[in-house]
């Protein structure tokens, strides 16, 4: 009889495979559509995927009904079919497969939360959250490098993008097979999940509203920095090849920090850890804004440091969310938070270009840094248990 797997191993391996397939496909798809002169279809499909994926609250409610692990398997399977369809560049198939990919990815990623929550006690969650984030980061790194390798060794461009688009869903399918065939998980040690008192409708509404506010703010400031980072670096004097090296260094910093968190966990004082990490991220973001045009070396060092603190803040924030969200509504409430983040991401993306034109990169990064500092204070203020209880009581 097989020994049950450590949940960190089961979820970590799945996350590596899922993220590898996702990012390999993300890299290859726009290049494939560009070669087919079908960027209009690509844009329409991308928008459809974003809209369907934005209904994360609905997919979260489904996950609560059918079980987190079942939702992950079903969602990942649907996502694999959806990204396999990216080989077709006509508008009709692009829309259909993009809708399937958006729904599948959203269900799989939201479904992970009720799966974790149903298997672990509060004290065991942080290390598993760290393992999932570590798997995601390794997957991003591996998927990106894998796509580059396929492109480099392909006999011509079309075969490279096609090959990557066909290999990517196989990686996701491998993740589904892993979850299906792996031995049942065990906790660290076997968990006794704390029982939650059934929350009232008002408690759901208050908590969901607070998480939505935090999600919109987080999505807004992330989209002010991430899309424009390559342009900022090039304008600061870094060559394009150097941009790739720096992004890899930032990814390595996040992997290293998350590996430490996976081992140590963030259970002790996660609110304080988030406050320190997020505030430091905000200060470093402001410093990046001041250093633009002054020294590209300083900008590079600050961004690598910032990446490490971002990894801490992400893991601490997810630990906080598990601590405050009722176990019987993890999928729904996490889904609401994810939908809010996507709304903020869209708002930031829409405003970013205008802000760049009006106040330039320094002003854009400065606004992102100030928003990060606001979030560092806002999350602990809104989500501390006594704050939640007091707001419901009134």
Image (cartoon, rainbow, N blue to C red):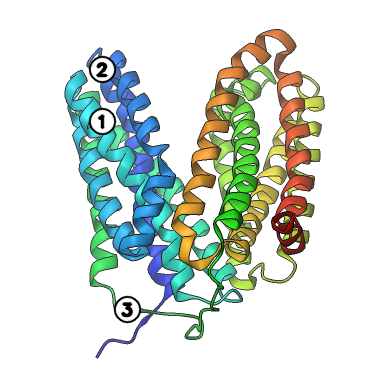
- Cβ atoms at labels 3 and 1 below 8 Å apart: no
Mark 2 nearby-residue class (10 Å; few <14, some 14–19, many ≥20): few
Identify the residue at image location x=42%, y=53%: 110
Residue 197 sits above or below residue 24 on the image: below
Mark 3–mark 2 distance (CA, rounded to whole Å): 45 Å
Identify the residue at image location x=64%, y=40%: 213
- Cβ atoms at labels 1 and 2 below 8 Å apart: yes
Q: Residue 90: x and y, percent?
A: 18, 19
Mark 3 nearby-residue class (10 Å; few <14, some 14–19, many ≥20): some
Residue 293 sits above or below residue 200 on the image: above
Judging depth in this view, the residue of 78 and 56 nearest the camera is: 56
Q: Residue 376: x and y, percent?
A: 76, 46
Please tell me in which quadrant of the rendered image residue 127 appears.
bottom right
> Sequence-wise, which precedes: disc 3 or disc 1?
1
Comparing labels 3 and 2, the label whose residue is closer to the camera: 3
- Cβ atoms at labels 3 and 2 below 8 Å apart: no
Judging depth in this view, the residue of 89 and 151 nearest the camera is: 89
Comparing labels 3 and 1, the label whose residue is closer to the camera: 3
Q: Which residue is mark 1?
A: 161
Q: Residue 249: x and y, percent?
A: 60, 44
Picture disc at residue 322: none
Q: Which residue is mark 2?
A: 35
Q: Which residue is mark 3?
A: 184
Q: Residue 238: x and y, percent?
A: 64, 24
The quarter of the rendered structure image containing the C terminus is bottom right
Identify the residue at image location x=66%, y=9%: 357
């Amino acid at each position: 009889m097989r020994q049950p797997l450590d949940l960190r191993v089961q979820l970590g391996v799945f996350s590596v495979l899922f993220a590898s397939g996702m990012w390999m496909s993300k890299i290859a798809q726009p290049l494939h559509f560009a070669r087919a002169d079908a960027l209009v279809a690509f844009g329409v499909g991308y928008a459809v995927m974003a809209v369907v994926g934005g209904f994360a609250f609905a997919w979260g409610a489904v996950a609560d009904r059918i079980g987190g692990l079942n939702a992950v398997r079903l969602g990942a399977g649907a996502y694999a079919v959806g990204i396999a369809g990216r080989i077709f560049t006509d508008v009709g198939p692009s829309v259909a497969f993009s809708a399937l990919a958006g729904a599948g990815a959203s269900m799989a990623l939201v479904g992970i939360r009720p799966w974790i929550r149903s298997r672990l006690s509060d004290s065991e969650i942080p290390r598993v959250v760290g393992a999932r984030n570590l798997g995601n980061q390794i997957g991003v790194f591996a998927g990106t490098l894998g796509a580059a390798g396929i492109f480099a060794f392909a006999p011509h461009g079309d075969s490279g993008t096609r090959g990557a688009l066909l290999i990517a869903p196989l990686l996701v399918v491998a993740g589904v097979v892993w979850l299906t065939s792996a031995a049942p998980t065990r906790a660290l040690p076997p968990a006794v999940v704390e029982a939650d008192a059934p929350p009232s409708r008002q408690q759901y509404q208050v908590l969901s509203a607070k998480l939505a506010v935090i999600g919109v703010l987080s999505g807004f400031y992330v989209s002010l920095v991430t899309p424009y980072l390559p342009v900022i670096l090039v304008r600061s004097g870094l060559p394009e090849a150097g941009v790739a090296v720096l992004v890899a260094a930032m990814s390595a910093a996040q992997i290293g920090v998350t590996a430490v968190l996976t081992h140590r966990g963030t259970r002790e004082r996660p609110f304080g850890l988030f406050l320190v990490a997020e505030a430091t991220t905000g200060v470093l973001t402001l410093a990046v804004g001041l250093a633009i045009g002054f020294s590209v070396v300083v900008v590079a060092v600050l961004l690598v440091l910032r990446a490490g603190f971002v990894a801490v803040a992400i893991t601490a924030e997810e630990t906080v969310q598990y601590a405050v969200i009722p176990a019987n509504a993890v999928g729904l409430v996490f889904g609401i938070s994810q939908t809010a983040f996507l709304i903020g991401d869209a708002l930031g993306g829409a405003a970013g270009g205008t802000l760049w034109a009006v106040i330039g990169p320094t002003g854009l990064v400065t606004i992102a840094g100030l928003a990060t500092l606001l979030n560092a204070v806002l999350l602990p203020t809104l989500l501390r248990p006594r704050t939640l209880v007091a707001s419901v009581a009134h």
